[in-house]
């Protein structure tokens, strides 16, 4: 797959109260951001487990980010701080496996930050495009090809 044809698959776990609302605002403002970012609304980033992040990468996402409330402004007090610790732990695990840490990131924003939401989606897409496809995505494609050949 050449760099010109590579379009990253990015999953964004977004806090209902801040980041998801910022995404809505970005849409209302008609701000453009990459369509390859798939948004999952969650009640609080504190609900995102390390397994969710790792499973997203394992299942073929080239990048994953968690977007929550500004630090100190979490509607559930410390959810975004828990998420930050989990994201940092996943980044460390990726590095230990020989993968780039920047495939998983954490961002904080308020519901009024629609332009920043669009910037984050664009920034993450550019970062992942520069890194290239996830090595696990390539492994999944090979495994799928082998399974398809075996069924013939």
Image (cartoon, rainbow, N blue to C red):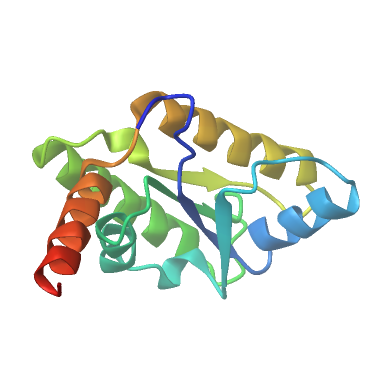
Q: Nearer the viewer, residue 23 or 129?
A: 129
Q: Position of residue 105 (x, y in %)?
A: 41, 43
Quadrant placement of the N terminus: top left
Q: Is residue 116 left or right of residue 92?
A: right
Quadrant placement of the C terminus: bottom left
Q: Nearer the viewer, residue 113 or 133?
A: 133
Q: Is residue 123 above or below residue 41?
A: above
Res. 78 in view: no
Res. 94 in view: yes
Q: Nearer the viewer, residue 10 or 79?
A: 10
For image coordinates 17% across by 50% down, the residue present is 139
Q: Is residue 106 above or below residue 48?
A: above
Q: Residue furthest front?
A: 152
Quadrant assignment, res 118: top right
For image coordinates 44% across by 34% down, the residue present is 6
Q: Is residue 113 left or right of residue 62?
A: right
Q: Is residue 134 above or below residue 4?
A: below
Q: Position of residue 42 (x, y in %)?
A: 55, 72
Q: Position of residue 4 (x, y in %)?
A: 48, 25
For image coordinates 65% across by 56% down, the residue present is 19
For image coordinates 55% across by 50% down, the residue present is 71
Q: Position of residue 140 (x, y in %)?
A: 22, 56
Quadrant assignment, res 55: bottom left
């Amino acid at each position: 797959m050449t760099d010109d044809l590579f379009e990253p698959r990015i999953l964004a776990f977004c806090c209902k109260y801040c980041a998801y609302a910022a995404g809505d605002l970005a849409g209302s403002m008609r701000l453009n951001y990459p369509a390859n970012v798939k948004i999952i609304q969650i009640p609080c980033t504190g609900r995102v487990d390390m397994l969710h992040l790792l499973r997203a990468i394992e299942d073929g996402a080239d990048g994953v980010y968690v977007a929550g409330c500004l630090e100190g402004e979490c509607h559930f007090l410390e959810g975004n701080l828990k998420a930050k610790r989990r994201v940092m732990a996943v980044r460390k695990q990726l590095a230990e496996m020989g993968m780039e840490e920047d495939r998983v990131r954490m961002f904080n924003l308020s519901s009024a930050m629609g332009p920043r939401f669009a910037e984050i989606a664009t920034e993450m897409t550019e970062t992942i495009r520069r890194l290239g496809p996830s090595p696990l995505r390539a492994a999944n494609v090979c495994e799928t090809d082998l399974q398809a050949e075996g069924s013939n």
